[in-house]
Amino acid sequence: MTSTAARYSPISCEFHDRLEDLATVRRPTQIRYRDADGTPQQRTATITDVYSRGGAEYLTLNTGETLRLDHLVEVDGEKLADS
């Protein structure tokens, strides 16, 4: 397990299910998150996939970006519970 994956904090199952629903409908979504440096970022993009790898969970956007789920702050106005 990598050190990055060891620090991964799983998100709620309910929020994970919401991300999978958004990936299924493939519509533009407002996403607020913190980048690797902790800087707030915002994108409007389509979630194309939600997956697990190396002990962490990620989503990919139609922009080609990959975001770790525990870096998300808000998606379509729904705040991640621990943010």
Image: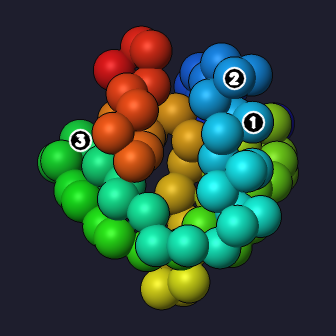
Give the residue drawn at x 62%, y 29%.
Answer: 15
Q: In the rendered view of the protein, which quadrant contains the C terminus?
A: top left
- Residue 77 can be seen, yes or no: yes
- Report x, y in % for residue 73: 35, 35
Q: Which residue appears farthest toward the bottom when viewing the image?
A: 63
User: With 16 as the anchor, is 79 left or right in this view?
Assistant: left
Q: In the rendered view of the protein, which quadrant contains the N terminus?
A: top right
Amino acid type, mark 2: Glu
- Report x, y in % for residue 75: 42, 45
Q: Which residue is mark 3?
A: 38
Q: Tell me if mark 2 has few (under 14), some (14-19) or many (20+) residues whose alpha carbon lies within 10 angstroms of its own.
A: few
Depth check, front residue: 38 or 65: 65
- Report x, y in % for residue 12: 65, 18
Give the residue drawn at x 60%, y 67%.
Answer: 47
Q: Tell me if mark 1 has few (under 14), some (14-19) or many (20+) residues whose alpha carbon lies within 10 angstroms of its own.
A: few
Labelled disc at residue 79: none
Q: CA distance from mark 2 to mark 3?
A: 24 Å
Q: Is label 1 or label 3 in front?
A: 1
Depth check, front residue: 8 or 61: 61
Q: Are marks 1 and 2 in contact (CB under 8 Å)?
A: yes
Q: Quadrant of residue 79?
A: top left
Q: Which residue is mark 1?
A: 17
Q: Which residue is mark 2?
A: 14
Depth check, front residue: 16 or 29: 29
- Report x, y in % for residue 32: 30, 49
User: With 23 as the anchor, is 77 left or right in this view?
Assistant: left
Secondary structure of the residue carrying tag 3 is: loop
